Image: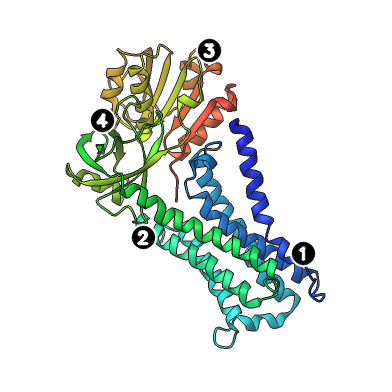
Amino acid sequence: MPLAVRGVFWIGLYVAVAVVPLLFAVLGDSPPARGFLVDFSVALGFVGLSMMGLQFALVARFQRMVAPFGEDAVVQFHRQISPVATAFILAHPLLLMVQDASVVGLFNPFTAPWRARFAVISAVCLLAIVLTSAWRRRLRLRYEAWQILHTVLAIASVLFALAHIVLVGRYVDTPWKRVLWTVMTAAFVGLIVWVRLVRPLRRLRRPWEVAHVTAERGAATTITLRPVGHEGFGFEPGQFGWITVERSPFALTQHPFSFSSSAEAEGSVQMSIKALGDFTRSITELRPGARAYLDGPHGVFTPDRNEGPGFVLIAGGIGIAPMLSMLRTFADRDDPRPCHLFYASRTCEDATLLDEVRELESRLDLTLVLVLEDPPSDWTGERGRIDGPLLRRRLPERYPRMQFFICGPTPMLDAVESILAEVGVPTAHIHTERFVFV
């Protein structure tokens, strides 16, 4: 099935599941007339709850589901749809209060019935998810602590909401409605079991270990991982994996990094990681033999799925890692197609993996354009940032036919995407990788 058709299927399934709970409200015996606002608020609450349950599916890393979009796009949708689901859920009690001011009394934790208490607790958990996600840096929450808090609050929010519905009773008062709610609840629990039990068990049976730790320029480190007791896995150049090091595979916290090694290399894989946070700064302390677990490969940011007569790679900072994987793979395959690499760095000393890229110039039809923001006085190459004038000046003649791959800081990605659209690169030829999972 073509990816576009699969994408339409998954979008349609998402919409269908999101509105399925409305069946509970419109089918069967109708309750006494309660007014439009009450019925509308219930409908919004149902849809919001279903969307919250679907959030678990969006981050479950089902490769068939994310393949048409890319995991980074699915995670971005997960982040952006959360406020919408939250608004639907919070609109439920707010509209009830507009209809009947006495509903405010249900927010008193000492006198309210348990059905109302569970609803309030669910809403508080939901608000806590949104606030801690939006203000994580301001609150100085470590990524690991945020991820644990996020998971616990999300599960609690949905469970308390389900308890609220059961105690209200109006929508589970017939056998067929109880069956539908049971199926929905089982699906929700099944997602948790899959993500937190089944997948970790599969990783537990396929461990890896750190073989080498190599310091790179630009405060980066390359770790080489080799499989223990199994053959490892194959991946496509540009893909990434989630890694857990010196922890149980059941740990809530995992970290995504691109592979920087060739996809043609068998067994071991490499990840090149820049020190940007608590975990990444600790990479230099790893020692050979340290146990690791890999969940992968993931991603559609790869030339193997986007063939063309040539490639333009645009990297900023550690965004060079997946580009190096592509170039190393092309070299191992004796690929004759032209590659143009635009690599932005603050200084030459900060240009991670630059030596490895230059070594590949003799094995590939590779044109390297190094752009330095703070170059030395004798620098004769490009300076500043990757912008419109630079790309118009240095892009190859037949660039509209080529495939473009961009990886780096989010502001750079946004700017370059706009520039490429302005110079006539088809949208279908532009591929980005955004590692913004928080």
Q: What amino acid is found at the position of numbered circle 2 in the picture?
A: Ala
Cα distance, mark 1 to mark 4? 65 Å
Q: How many marks?
A: 4
Q: Which residue is mark 3?
A: 398
Q: Earlier in the sequence, mark 2 or mark 4?
A: 2
Circles 1, 4 touching at the beta carbon (< 8 Å):
no
Left or right position of 200 against 220: right
Is residue 376 at least partly visible in the picture? Answer: no
**Residue 412's disc number:** none
Circles 4, 3 touching at the beta carbon (< 8 Å):
no
**Residue 145's disc number:** 2
User: Neighbour class for label 1 at 10 Å: few (<14), some, many (≥20)?
Assistant: few
User: Neighbour class for label 4 at 10 Å: few (<14), some, many (≥20)?
Assistant: few
For image coordinates 65% across by 80% down, the residue present is 104
Q: Mark 3, mark 1: which one is toward the viewer?
A: 1
Q: Which residue is mark 4?
A: 349
Query: How far across and down, in percent of the image, does residue 385 sit?
Result: 42, 29
Q: Which residue is mark 1?
A: 26
Cα distance, mark 4 to mark 3? 32 Å
